[in-house]
Amino acid sequence: MTRRTPRPVARHEFWVRALRGWDVGFYAITAVAGVSIAIEVRSLREAAVAVLGLAALVLAYLALGRRGAQRGDVLLTRTYLAVLVTVVVLEVGLSELGSVLLFVAYSQIWFFATRRLEGVLWSVLLTVAFAAAIVVREPGAVATVADAAELVGQVGTGLVFAIALGLWITWVSEQSEERAALVEELGAAQAELASTHHASGVLAERARLAQEIHDTLAQGFTSVVMLAQAASAELARDRVGPATERVGQIEQVARDNLAQARALVAAFGPPELERGTLGDALDRLAARFEAETHVRVEVDGLRELGAVGPEHAVVLLRAAQEALANVRKHADATVVRLTVGRDGDDVRLEVVDDGRGLPAGAVEGVGLRGMRERVDAGGGTLEVGSGPGGGTRVAVTLPRDTVPATSPLGDGGAAAPRPGTTREDA
C-alpha cells in the first residue's frame, strides 16, 4: 500500500475565504482610531498627519495587501506589512490611542505571513517599533529601570500573546486546509472508484450478453443453416416431403430464436424456463435436437430431479445446450445420453455421446469457456473428457441450491415423457 503524500497547504486560502470579514474589521478599527487620534492630539497639524497616515494605510491595504492576498503575491503583501508597521509607529508616536491599531496590525501580520517564522519576525519588529514610539512620545516613560522593566514587561506580554494566538490560528487554518484537501482527494477517489466499478460492470455485462447470444441465438442460427442445407439437399433429390419437414423445422427454430432475442432485450430469463420446469426445458431441447439431427437422445433422471433454483436451472440448461451444440458440430455421433440427477445435495448434469471424441491437444472454444465461467460463478465444477464408449463426456456439478416453496420452476421439476424419445428413469 502506497503512503499518501499530502499536497502543500496554501495557508493563506483559509484567510482569503473570509476576506470580506477582514475588510469590515479593518475599516471599522481604522476609522475609530482615526477619529479618536484626531480628537485627542494637541494640534491641527498632528491631527492632519494622523488622518493622512491612516488614509495611506487604507490605500496601501487596497492596492498592496488585499490584492497580494488574492493573487498570492508575496512581494505585495510584504510591502504592505512594511507600510502597516510604519503607520502604526507613526500613530502611536502621535497618541497613545494609536495602540488600537495593534488589533489590526498583529492580525494582518498573521493574515499575510506565508510561514510561521515570518509571522514571528514581523510581530517582533512591530513590538519593538511600538515600544520605541512610546519612548519617543513620552521620554519619561523609561526614566527609571523600573519604568523600563514595566514597559518591556507590558509589550513583551502583548508580543507573547500575539505570537501564541497567531500560531494557534495558523494551526487551525492549516488543519482546515488539510481536511479540505483530504475531502477533495476522497471525492476524487470515490469518483474514480465509481467509474472503475461502472466500467467493470459494463465489461461484465458485455461478456454476459455475448455468452447469452452464443448460447442461444448463435446456436439457433447454426441450426437454421444446417437445416437449410439439408432442405436444399432434399430438394436437389426431388424429395419434397422431407424438404418441407426441414422448412417447418427452420420456422420453429426461427420462432424460438425470436423468443430468445425478445427475452434478452427484455432482460428476462430463458424463455424455455418461463414455459415450465427445468425438466420440461431439457425434454424439449432433446426433442428438438433429435428432430433436427436424427441423432437419438436418451434422457434420464428428469422425474427424480426435484426442484432446482432459477440460477442453477439457467446454468444447467445452458450447459446442456452448449454440449448438444458441440455434438451437432463436431461429434458425428449416433446416440447422445443426457442425464440429470442429485448427488447428495449437489445437482449433476451429464451429456455423453458416442462420436469421435476429443482430438489430442484440443483447445476450449468460446462455448466451453463460457460454460466453465457460468459453472464457476455458480460454485460448481465442469468436467470435459472422453466418454466410456470413446465419445465425449461433459459433466456439470453444482452445489446445493435453495429453492423457494413457490419456485417458478415447478414442484419436482419433472417433465412429461415426450413421444418417441427414449427415457430411462432411474
Image: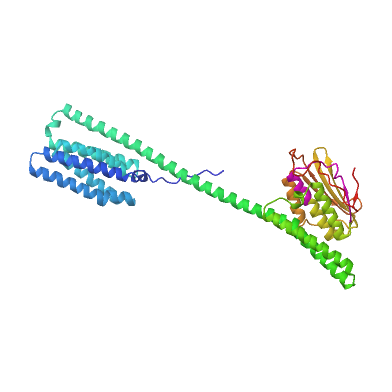
User: Which quarter of the image is occupied by the N terminus?
Assistant: top right
Foreground: 258 or 42? 258
Do we see residue 147 in this rendering? yes
Q: Is residue 23 left or right of residue 281?
A: left
The image quarter in which residue 343 lies: top right
Percent across and percent down for residue 163 are 30, 36
Percent across and percent down for residue 102 are 23, 38
Q: Is residue 201 left or right of residue 309?
A: left
User: Which quarter of the image is occupied by the C terminus?
Assistant: top right
Do we see residue 361 in this rendering? no
Foreground: 95 or 257? 257
Percent across and percent down for residue 171 are 38, 38
Q: Residue at x 86, y 47 (%)?
A: 416
Q: Is residue 59 magenta?
A: no
Q: Residue furthest left?
A: 43
Q: Residue at x 85, y 66 (%)?
A: 244
Q: Residue at x 83, y 55 (%)?
A: 324
Q: How many marks?
A: 0
Foreground: 172 or 238? 238
Q: Is residue 124 shown above or below 211?
A: above
Residues shaded magenta: 296-318
Q: Residue furthest top?
A: 146
Q: How is the image coloured?
A: rainbow
Percent across and percent down for residue 46 are 10, 43
